[in-house]
Amino acid sequence: MSRLFLAPMEGLADYVLREVLTSTGGFDGCVSEFVRVTGSVLPERVYERDTPEVLHGGRTPGGTPMVIQLLGSDPEWMALNAAQAASLSPHGLDLNFGCPAKVVNRHGGGAMLLAHPEQLNRIVSSVRAAVPAGIAVTAKMRLGVSDTSLAIDCATALAEGGAASLVVHARTRDHGYRPPAHWEWIARIDDAVDVPVTANGEVWTVADWERCRAVSGCADVMIGRGAVSDPFLALRIRGLMERTSSGEEWPAVLGLLADYLRKLQARVAARHEHGRVKMWLSYLKRTWPQAAELHAAIRRLHDSRDILDVIERAQALGGLIPMPAHQHAALGLADPATPRYLADCTVAGAVQ
Ligand SMILES: Cc1cc2nc3c(=O)[nH]c(=O)nc-3n(C[C@H](O)[C@H](O)[C@H](O)COP(=O)(O)O)c2cc1C
């Protein structure tokens, strides 16, 4: 059996995008954005706000199991917070040992811990001891801080500390997000530990998924940015949609965008709504050229109701985008509702 997981993506895959991306189907599980643990026990309301799946049996509204991810470097505080998070019955707890963010690394957390396998072991063991046996504790790691010399030691330390499985993002902290992902290293780690390993990094297409599995030897794969760029990727991998994307799918993407925006309007502070949609569109551009035109059309809009209006009119036009007012004026046209097909770059070129 081969499983697919939606990766944790802080600041991107919040619970609203998790809901939309898992609602299309194909994922066996998803992981929350990291919850940062410092010197206190976070109250339940933090989880109810950031991981509201805990209010619904630990699942997204579409039924996909959700695991809470914790990030921190102090074994005791991690254990206390893990016990609190576990009391909310998520589908599991995952520990982040890969975050490259400076603010996290400065305090010795995230990927910096990969320089100290013994500390990884202490953190996992104390979390494991603090959490009921029925809740799996897992870990997500990179290959190291600046090189891969401790990759196997880290993986072994995590497995021996009690991690039920490992996700390996096949890059070091210093690699950042630069391709390639070194899938061959996942195979080495998989050989070295006796817990299941999930491969992660640079899976954008069905062909990438096939190559990643072949090189890593792992059945299970976790997908991050690829799922944001192509929300149907999990379905394509499952053989439930065409293998590659096409312009015919664009109206369905508009439907997801409209759904996302309506959900944001209901749940997120108004000032964040337009930025979230623009961020998702900037990923969608990688798969659909139409997304680039929609992005251009809404770029100057800050009120999400105006953005939703553009999307809804495009839906009504079967994917055609109403020309944004400023472009329309620049062209000296009379009717601001003039639609144009998103892929038509001629006019866009004329007004730039
Ligand atoms: C915007 C963004 C936020 C991320 N936040 C997290 C996080 O909260 N926890 C984590 O373990 N990894 C995080 N990651 C790393 C991803 O989970 C994943 O390991 C990485 O993007 C490689 O997979 P991909 O090539 O499929 O995107 C983040 C990545 C991105 C792009």
Image: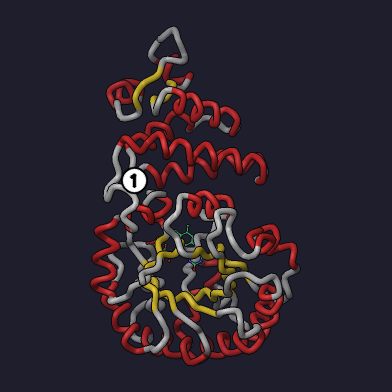
Residue type highlighted by circle 1: Arg
Q: Compared with residue 343, is residue 75 higher up or lower down, i.e. above or below?
A: below
| Residue 235 coordinates in the image, percent (x, y) | 37, 53
- Quick one: SS at disc 1? loop
Q: Residue at x 62, y 70 (%)?
A: 90
Q: Nearer the viewer, residue 54 or 239?
A: 239
Tell me: 33 left or right of 229: right
Q: Nearer the viewer, residue 161 or 272?
A: 161
| Residue 335 coordinates in the image, percent (x, y) | 45, 10
Number of residues whose C-alpha sits closer than 10 Å to that of mark 1, classed few (under 14), some (14–19) or many (20 or more): some
Q: Quadrant of residue 252?
A: top left
Which residue corresponds to mark 1? 286
Please state, as top left, top right, bottom left or bottom right, where the N terminus lies in the image: bottom left
| Residue 103 coordinates in the image, percent (x, y) | 56, 67
Q: Residue at x 52, y 36 (%)?
A: 258
Query: In the rendered picture of this protein, how many numbered marks are placed on residues?
Result: 1
Colour treatment of the image = secondary structure
Q: Quadrant of residue 331?
A: top left
Tell me: 42 left or right of 205: right
Ligand 1 occupies quarter: bottom left
Q: Compared with residue 251, is residue 276 higher up or lower down, i.e. above or below?
A: below
Q: Residue at x 46, y 73 (%)?
A: 98
Q: Nearer the viewer, residue 323 or 119?
A: 323
| Residue 109 coordinates in the image, percent (x, y) | 55, 76
Q: Residue at x 73, y 75 (%)?
A: 40
Q: Is mark 1 within 8 Å of ligand 1?
A: no
Please state, as top left, top right, bottom left or bottom right, where the C terminus lies in the image: top left
Q: Residue furthest top?
A: 334
Q: Compared with residue 147, is residue 126 higher up or lower down, i.e. above or below?
A: below
Q: Compared with residue 336, is residue 317 higher up or lower down, i.e. above or below?
A: below
